[in-house]
Image (cartoon, coloured by chain):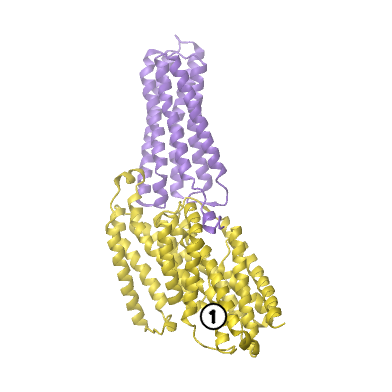
Amino acid sequence: MEIIQEHGMIFLIIAVIFGLYMTWGIGANDVANVMGTSVGSGAITVTTAIIIAAIFEFLGAVVAGGNVTQTIRKGIIDPVPLEGAPEILVLGMLASLLAAAVWLMIASMRGWPVSTTHAIVGAVVGFAIAGIGLEAVNWPKISQIVASWVVSPVLGGIFSFALMMSIRHLILNTPNPFAAAKRWGPVYVFLVGFVITLVSLFKGLKHLDIELSIQMSFLVAAIMGAAVGLIGWALIRRVKVDEEADKEFHYASVEKVFVPMMLFTACGMAFAHGSNDVANGVGPMAAVVGLVQSGGEVSQSSALPLWILLVGGFGIVVGLATYGYKVMRTIGSKITELTPTRGFCATMAAAMTVVLASRTGMPVSTTHIAVGGVIGVGMARGIGALDLRVIGGIIMSWITTLPVAGALSALFYFILRTIFIG
Amino acid sequence: MAGNSPFASLFGRSPFKPMQEHMRTVNTCAIEVIKLFEALCDCDQEKLKATQQKIFDLEHEADTIKNQLRAHLPKSLFMPVDRRDLLEVLDLQDTIADTAQDIAGLLVERKMTIPDDMREPLLSMVRRCVDACNMACKIIERLDELVETGFRGPESESVLGMVEELNKIESDTDQMGLELKRKLFAHEDDMNPVSVVFWHELINMVGELADYAEKVGNRLRLLVAR
């Protein structure tokens, strides 16, 4: 107790610094992956992607980022053995943040497809085992989380497969695909707005003091979807048939209809990423802040302070502006094989899956889900060539990330404990 | 940093562009065969040699594209078509260029003289065979559209229609080949017997241009029907 009272301010400052470091890293690397499908398909420029990401990552974090933050903050560790020793939790959360951030830095320099989510979950579990004991880990919750890591990319794949098939059926394989694209385009845009709003609203805005009934949620989501669909319709209306390009490739004009539509999936994706991944940086920070402010009350049930989500959103935007744009350019230039229709399906499916996961509080990997989305399109015979060795790389990154982040976190924990407790 | 994000490495090189590039090269090679026979009919040795050289160069170019494509088609690649079927189409395309090369080689290395009444039917047959190659090339050019539509719907119907047409062109060339051989055998007594054998061989080789073009189309039908 005394330790927290004595060093409370220092802990707070360190927590914010580490939290910023972590979210900076997310902005610098992770966001580029998330926006990759939109930039790569040529639908939006890198600059547009940055602006969209800055706004919607922030919105996603603030509006829908609460649930996952709570999971990282309180769901993984059983607080009961820590009654009376809150400083252990404070130091552990600081160690976890640093460990995850350092591991992500190393991994992204090496170009490994590591997930921020896996890193932070591995780090928190690692600290819990080393610092408290095996029994401190909420194993049922962990198994749920790990299961969600397998289920979510598959779900993303299934969604995108279904979307691709529907686009084929309604648009591409009709006598006049261009007219069909113009007719159905706004409907798809409506769906993007509707689904993402609905999932976020569904009893999800408690921390903003907004509570809507189920009917109200549906109504607001429908209005939101209609508004977005209307903007989409206005943009799609301006797309003209390009006869020259159509001679070369019969579906060139149809693809062009999907370019403005990808603007909306890009927003949705940034929102989804903000709602899920910001929590990775912000969750441990929130835990530290909560403990310090309550004077060491471990089982506190205080709500998540909004400013913490704001700090997370800020870190991501800075990461984007200082480094993320470079990574985005590299990735964008490498995936030009993805055409707007394909990019649309993959991105929309991924955004829906991530927002859904965020709603249930599951910290999933946005990047892995987006990969799942692309593979789903491939399964629908939609992409020239996919190198499925990536799946092996992703599985390898799981096997390494969890223990390495855990071990690093334990190491940092013991160092911090030596410094502050002796 | 992040040089190989999971996305960047997820996308393999699509085989369809190189397939089309290969077929275009092969087709140009086949078109040159017309010039070869025109030079023969005009007894223009220089044009004959120049055309032969061009065919050899084009065949070599096609080989390079083929080998590069094969090298970038690892087994881990997931494609909308079966990898073996695709490689088979590629091999068939390549055989067209090989055949053109064989024809060019024979015409340059062995002095062939052509009976007057065979000139026109021979040139028509060559042109018809090259028509078949053109058709095969047009079909391969539609691979982009097939991938876009998932090898289903009106687009695949239209490609299958083109394959039908290709089959008709090939039957034409069969007929023309038979006619030509009939004319050749009529000269059996006044021609050098070795020449007769070589002309017979040559007519078959020209016919093979269309045969392989037809096989390209028929193999593609399997890709669509997977």
Query: Which residue: 40% across, 41% down?
Result: B141
- Which residue has dot 1 on it? A286
Give A312 or A179, whichever is nearer the viewer.
A312
Callout 1, which amino acid? Ala
Rendered-image quadrant of the C terminus of chain A: bottom right
Give A29 or A243, whichever is nearer the viewer.
A29
Residue A41 x/y as whole percent:
42, 55
In this orientation, does residue A284 appear?
Answer: no
Residue B176 x/y as whole percent:
38, 25
Q: Is residue B123 above or below residue B143?
A: above
Place residue A9 in its image quadrant: bottom right
In the shown orientation, is residue A169 left or right of residue A422? left
Place residue B114 in its image quadrant: top left
Residue A233 x/y as whole percent:
29, 63
Rendered-image quadrant of the N terminus of chain A: bottom right
Residue located farthest toward the top when viewing the structure as drawn: B190
Q: Which chain is yellow?
A: A
Query: Which residue: 65% across, 73% down?
Result: A409
Colour applied to chain B: purple
